Structures are given as C-alpha cells and as structure tokens.
Image (cartoon, grey):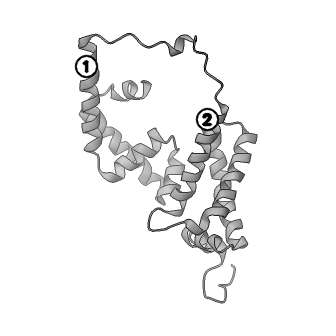
Amino acid sequence: MEPANSQGEPPPSEATDEALLRAVGERDRDAFATLFRRYAGRIKGFLIRSGFREGEADEAAQEVMLSVWRNAAGYDPARASAATWIYAIARNRRIDMLRRRRPEPDPDDPMFRPDPEPTPDAAAAIAARDRALRAALADLGPDQMQVVRLAFFDGLSHAEIAAILDAPLGTVKSRLRLAMNRLRGALGDGFAAELFDD
C-alpha cells in the first residue's frame, strides 16, 4: 500500500477517478498513469465492440487518453462523473473514426432510392407505434431511462454502463430488465424486435 502524499491525499492507485482527473488537470503524471491503466483497456474494448479492428481500437484508445491528458483541466465534476466524461471523449472519437471510414456514396446504389410512400393505414400504424413508444419511454424512471439510452442508443455493454454510472453490474442489469419489462407491458411482447430492427 502506498503512503499518502504530503498533502494527506491518497496515492493515485487508491484515488477516485474524479480526484485523478483533477490531478491530471494539474499535470500529475502518476495520476495520469493510473487513469490510463483504469480506462485504456476499457475504451479499447468499447471500440472493438463498435466494429473496429484491434489495431485501430488500440490507436484510438491512446488518442482518447491523450485527449484526457490535454483536456483534464476543463473537467467539471459537477457536470459529469469522470467515467462519463472519459467515455464521452471515446464516443466522439468513435464517431470521428466512423465518418472517416465511410466511402463516398454511389448515387446509383439502390439503397439510396427512396422507399415507396406508406399506405394511409401503414402511416397511421407507424405514427401510433411511435406515439406509444414515446409515451412508454417517458413513463420510465430516470435511472431506467439512463440505462436504456446507454445500452440501446449508445451501444454500451452492461459492464461499461456500470463503470460509467459507478454502479454494481447487478444494479445495471436489474434496471435494464425492469425497464424492458415496463416497455414490454406498455407495448406488447413483440415490441423489442420491431423497435430495434427498424
């Protein structure tokens, strides 16, 4: 166990992520090394699960951590947890990589042809489904809505969500299961396949 420093602060290996980020903002290399050990592998895994090759993900994770080093002085713990702040940088990096990866679209590709206009009955059914979904999502509690957003809209794993929320993995799974049960009850059993296949 490392001793506390002269100001009585815990050693970097025992400090909270928020305390480490504040120290990194003051250019503390030991604090950055600890944050790097805690997050670089997780970020690399997040990028690999997002469809990037290992080499790309490794390079991007290092770029994310370099961005953490450069921008840590601007971190505000009142606005977000350290994990949320770091993963926001990783998500932005993922978006940048996806934009660069896209080839120029071929205007003659059938994928770019507009879908035929839905029939009036189909349009009414789609509108009703969308209204029901918005109402069901609005009825979720903030904790449940947060895990649904992170899992289905941000594409994070349960473990990544647990790290971001600083919550036990079981709590994340429980919140997600409760949210899905509430949505299923409000929308019917077939809602998940229909919702996430569109």
Farthest-out residue, front:
107
The C terminus sits in image quarter = top left
SS state under label 1:
helix
Q: Position of residue 137 (x, y in %)?
A: 30, 40
Q: Which mark is residue 125?
A: 1
Residue 34's place in the image compared with 181, above or below, is below
Residue occupying the point 53% across, 14% down:
111
Q: Which residue in the protein does label 2 denote?
A: 99
From the viewer's perspective, tell me whether residue 167 is left or right of residue 59: left
From the viewer's perspective, tell me whether residue 176 is left or right of residue 140: right
Q: Position of residue 32 (x, y in %)?
A: 68, 67
- Dot 1: few (<14), some (14–19), or many (≥20) neighbours within 10 Å? few
Q: Are marks 2 and 1 in contact (CB under 8 Å)?
A: no
Q: Which mark is residue 188?
A: none
**Residue 20, image quadrant:** bottom right
- Choose the circle earlier in sequence order: 2 or 1: 2
- Residue type, numbered disc 2: Arg
Residue occupying the point 51% across, 40% down:
155
- Front-lying residue, 130 or 143: 130
